[in-house]
Amino acid sequence: MKTRQLHQFIQKHHYALVELIAFLFVLLFVFAAVAKLLEGDRFFNNLNNSPILPDKAVTVILSWAIPILEIIVAILIVGRKTRLKGFYSALILSILFALYSSGIVFFSPYTPCSCGGIITLLSWPQHLMLNIGLILLAITGIRLYRKRGLFDTHTVLTS
């Protein structure tokens, strides 16, 4: 696609692109949170074995905070009035996960995986690439969302 065609595509499908990005983040965060909560002992043990986390107290806090934050971010993204906050929260979580993945990839002597579901099949470099992709997706969602104030009630009702 040429640049102009891409611009026209984005203009035409602006609403659908934001909805798709929101759907992907909600799906990802709910899936990840549920997997972590259902496999709580495994998630805790993998975090506890992480060479990057300093001690057990941090592990206990993170083993609950991460899935709870993922659910909160998903809820923020679902709500039209809170979606922008949700996209910013998704960006922050994705950056934090990318920093953690970078630490594992570049500085860790071993690589425990504390993910859930199908994401456990990824290598740590693939985790890092996924997180970088999620950062770019969150930035895209933020830019598209802010570009036109798309989710103003009047705009949605008259579109």
Image (cartoon, rainbow, N blue to C red):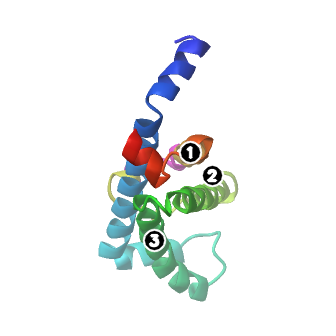
Using the image as rendered, state which of residue 58 and residue 29 is in the foreground. 29
Residue at mark 1 to residue at mark 2: CA–CA distance: 6 Å
* Residue that mark 2 sits on: 105
- Report the disc number at residue 125: 1
Q: Are marks 3 and 2 in contact (CB under 8 Å)?
A: no
Residue 6 seen in the current view: yes
Q: Where is residue 52 in the image (x, y as percent from the top left)?
A: 65, 69
Q: Do the residues labelled 1 and 2 touch (CB within 8 Å)?
A: yes
- Horizontally, residue 13 falls left or right of residue 86, namely left
Judge whether residue 30 is colored magenta: no
Residue at (52% x, 61% y) in the render: 86
Q: Do the residues labelled 1 and 3 touch (CB within 8 Å)?
A: no
- Report the disc number at residue 72: 3
Q: What element carries label 1?
A: helix
> Dot 2 surroundings within 10 Å: few (below 14), some, or many (20 or more)?
some
Compared with 62, 9 (above or below) is above
- Which of the two discs, 3 and 2, labels the residue nearer the N terminus? 3
Compared with 50, 141 (above or below) is above
Highlighted range, magenta: 120-127
- Horizontally, residue 39 falls left or right of residue 13, namely left
The residue most toward the bottom is 57
Q: Which amino acid does label 2 sit on?
A: Val
> Dot 3 surroundings within 10 Å: few (below 14), some, or many (20 or more)?
some
Q: Which amino acid does label 3 sit on?
A: Ile
Q: Which amino acid does label 1 sit on?
A: Pro
